[in-house]
Image (cartoon, coloured by chain):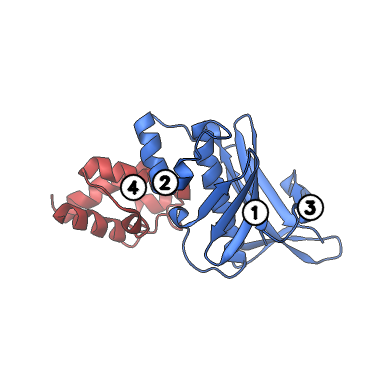
C-alpha cells in the first residue's frame, strides 16, 4: 500500500533556531534528531522526517490503521539522501524523498513491494479521482479503482497511485 | 484567569493557523482543529508551541496528542497550570 506527502519549504521556515529545535523535538525521537543534517540541511531533515511519517500514516490507514496521526510514534531511519525505512504500528515501509528547490516530497510503500508499482500523476485533471470514505482512488482505463494518495501544501500538489 | 479568558486566549493562539474562517467565527468548545478549522497537521505542533509560550507550560507528547479540540486543549492547559 502507498502514501505520500509534499511540503512547501517556503511556508515551513522557522523564526528562530530555538523554535526549530522545540518543534523538531515534538515530532522526532532522539535517534532521529541525531540524523538531522546528515544528508541535507537540518531544516530539510525535519521536513523529510515529517513527510515520511505523514506518508507512512496514510499508507497505514489504507491498511486498516484507525488511530490518529502521532508523528513521534512513527520511527524513521534515513538510509541515504533519498531512501528511508519507516516502522509504524505493525507495518514496515520503505520511503523515498526528493527535494527540488522549495518542494520536498516523499512516497512510501510496504517494504516488500516495489517502487516501480507507483505511478506519479503530474496533472490532477488528467485522472478521475473518487473517494471511498476518506480514501482516494484513481480510475484506470479499464474502470478499475486504483489506490491513490494525494497531498498538497502551499503551491505544490502531488498525486500517486498504484499501477493497474 | 477565568474560563472565558482561557477560551479567548486559545482562540487568539489558533487564529493564524485556521483555514476555515466560518468555523472559526462560530468557535465552540467541541470545535475540532483538523476537521472543523482545517488546521493542517504540521501547524498543530505550532499551536502546541504557542500554547507553551503563552501559558509558560511544557506539554509532553502524550498531552499534545489529546489537543485536537478546543475543549481538550483547554483541559490540558489547565492541568499543566495546576501542575
Left/right of residue B8 with respect to residue A156 in the rendered view: left
Chain ID, blue in image: A
Q: Nearer the viewer, residue A163 or B71?
A: A163
Q: Nearer the viewer, residue B12 or A69?
A: A69
Q: Mark 2 or mark 3: name the one nearer the start of the chain.
A: 2
Binning the other alpha carbons within 10 Å of mark 4 as few (below 14), some (14 to 19) or many (20 upward) gives: many
Q: Residue at x 29, y 56 (%)?
A: B73
| Subunit that carries the residue with mark 4 | B
Q: Are marks 3 and 1 on the same chain?
A: yes
Which residue carries the number 4 mark?
A: B48
- Point out which mark residue A94 bears: 1
**Number of numbered discs:** 4
In the displayed structure, A87 sits above or below A11; it is below
Tell me if I can see residue A94 in this picture.
Answer: yes
Q: Residue at x 46, y 62 (%)?
A: A68
Q: Are marks 1 and 2 on the same chain?
A: yes
Binning the other alpha carbons within 10 Å of mark 1 as few (below 14), some (14 to 19) or many (20 upward) gives: many
Amino acid at each position: 500500500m502507498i502514501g505520500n506527502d509534499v511540503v512547501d519549504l517556503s511556508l515551513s521556515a522557522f523564526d528562530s533556531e530555538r523554535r526549530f529545535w522545540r518543534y523538531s523535538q515534538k515530532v522526532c525521537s532522539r535517534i532521529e534528531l541525531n540524523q538531522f543534517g546528515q544528508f541535507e540541511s537540518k531544516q530539510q531533515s525535519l521536513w523529510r522526517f515529517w513527510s515520511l511519517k505523514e506518508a507512512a500514516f496514510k499508507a497505514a490507514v489504507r491498511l486498516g490503521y484507525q488511530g490518529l496521526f502521532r508523528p513521534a510514534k512513527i520511527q524513521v531511519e534515513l538510509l541515504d539522501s533519498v531512501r528511508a525505512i519507516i516502522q509504524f504500528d505493525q507495518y514496515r515501509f520503505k520511503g523515498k524523498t526528493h527535494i527540488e528547490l522549495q518542494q520536498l516530497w516523499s512516497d512510501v510503500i510496504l517494504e516488500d513491494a516495489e517502487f516501480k508499482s507507483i505511478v506519479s500523476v503530474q496533472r490532477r485533471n488528467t485522472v478521475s479521482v473518487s473517494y471511498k470514505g476518506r480514501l482516494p482512488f484513481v480510475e484506470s482505463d479499464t474502470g478499475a479503482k486504483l489506490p491513490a494518495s494525494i497531498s498538497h501544501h502551499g503551491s505544490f500538489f502531488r498525486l500517486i497511485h498504484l499501477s493497474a | 484567569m477565568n474560563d472565558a479568558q482561557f477560551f479567548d486566549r486559545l482562540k487568539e493562539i489558533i487564529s493564524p493557523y485556521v483555514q476555515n474562517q466560518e468555523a472559526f467565527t462560530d468557535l465552540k468548545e467541541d470545535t475540532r482543529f483538523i476537521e472543523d478549522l482545517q488546521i493542517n497537521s504540521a501547524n498543530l505542533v505550532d499551536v502546541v508551541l504557542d500554547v507553551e509560550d503563552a501559558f509558560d507550560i511544557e506539554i509532553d507528547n502524550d498531552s499534545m496528542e489529546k489537543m485536537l479540540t478546543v475543549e481538550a486543549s483547554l483541559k490540558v492547559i489547565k492541568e499543566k497550570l495546576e501542575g
